[in-house]
Image: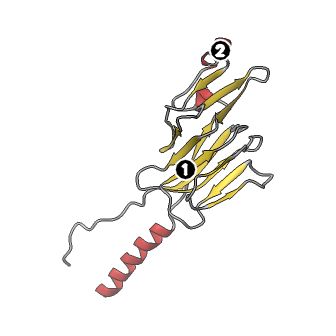
């Protein structure tokens, strides 16, 4: 009877790990007031050229962080307001890294940039596993883990014309592990 009970408990623990739900984090650059840190329309004044440099910022959404790293010859990463349209875009410039990091213990499953964005020369960094798809009518581009385990995913741009409106990160949060309160029966 005790063996059956222990087998049932271990089965329930395994099923709980397999049934773990995915979470999403959305970075909506088309609405800079929704970002963390946020930016208001007045931050994008004509005197500033309708741009805000964010290379040294780290954005967070639902536990996921989005940060940047520029090479010494990079123009950096910007959020730009196109004045005539009042549209906002994240614009990583040449020689910039864009890095997504899951919450501690979490794993990134996919990263998707919304339709209407421009990919430019933006791609996964050398040696970054997973698959990259830029040929769908459903999104601008999408990176998928494809069974790999990635706590952080790094991209690089080696050219211009990158304009991203929304970025959605799907991730698997850290699994809560049951710890026994006693080891003897």
User: What percent of the width, then of the height, locates residue 175?
Assistant: 42, 61
State yes or no: discs 2 and 1 in contact (Cβ < 8 Å). Answer: no
- As drawn, the label of residue 175 is none
Query: Which quarter of the rendering shows the C terminus?
Result: bottom left
Q: Nearer the viewer, residue 125 or 180?
A: 125
Residue occupied by mark 1: 154
Q: How is the image coloured?
A: secondary structure
Name which residue lies at 74% across and 47% down.
Answer: 140
x then y, percent, for residue 2: 29, 85
Q: Nearer the viewer, mark 2 or mark 1?
A: 1
Which quadrant holds residue 28?
top right
Query: Secondary structure beneath disc 1?
Result: strand
Q: Is residue 36 above or below residue 99?
A: above
Circle 2 sits in a helix, a strand or a loop, which is it?
loop
User: Mark 2 or mark 1: which comes first in sequence?
Assistant: 2
Q: Which residue is mark 2?
A: 45
Left or right of residue 34: residue 18? left
| Residue drawn at point x = 79 percent, y = 20 percent | 84
Q: How many marks?
A: 2
Identify whether 73 is placed above or below 179. above
């Amino acid at each position: 009877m005790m063996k059956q009970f222990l087998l049932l408990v271990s089965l329930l623990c395994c099923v709980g790990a397999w049934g773990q739900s995915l979470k999403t984090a959305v970075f909506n650059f088309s609405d800079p007031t929704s970002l963390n840190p946020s930016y208001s329309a007045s931050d994008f004044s004509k005197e500033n050229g309708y741009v805000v440099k964010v290379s040294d910022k780290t954005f967070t959404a639902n536990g996921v962080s989005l940060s940047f790293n520029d090479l010494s010859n990079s123009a950096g990463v910007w959020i730009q307001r196109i004045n005539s349209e009042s549209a906002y875009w994240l614009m990583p410039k040449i020689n910039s890294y864009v890095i997504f990091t899951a919450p501690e213990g979490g794993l990134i499953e996919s990263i998707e940039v919304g339709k209407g964005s421009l990919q430019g020369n933006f791609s996964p960094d050398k040696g970054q596993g997973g698959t990259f798809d830029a040929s769908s009518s459903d999104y601008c581009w999408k990176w998928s883990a494809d069974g790999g385990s990635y706590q952080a995913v790094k991209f690089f741009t080696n050219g211009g014309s990158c304009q991203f409106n929304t970025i959605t990160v799907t991730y698997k949060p850290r699994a809560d592990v049951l710890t026994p309160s006693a080891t003897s029966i």
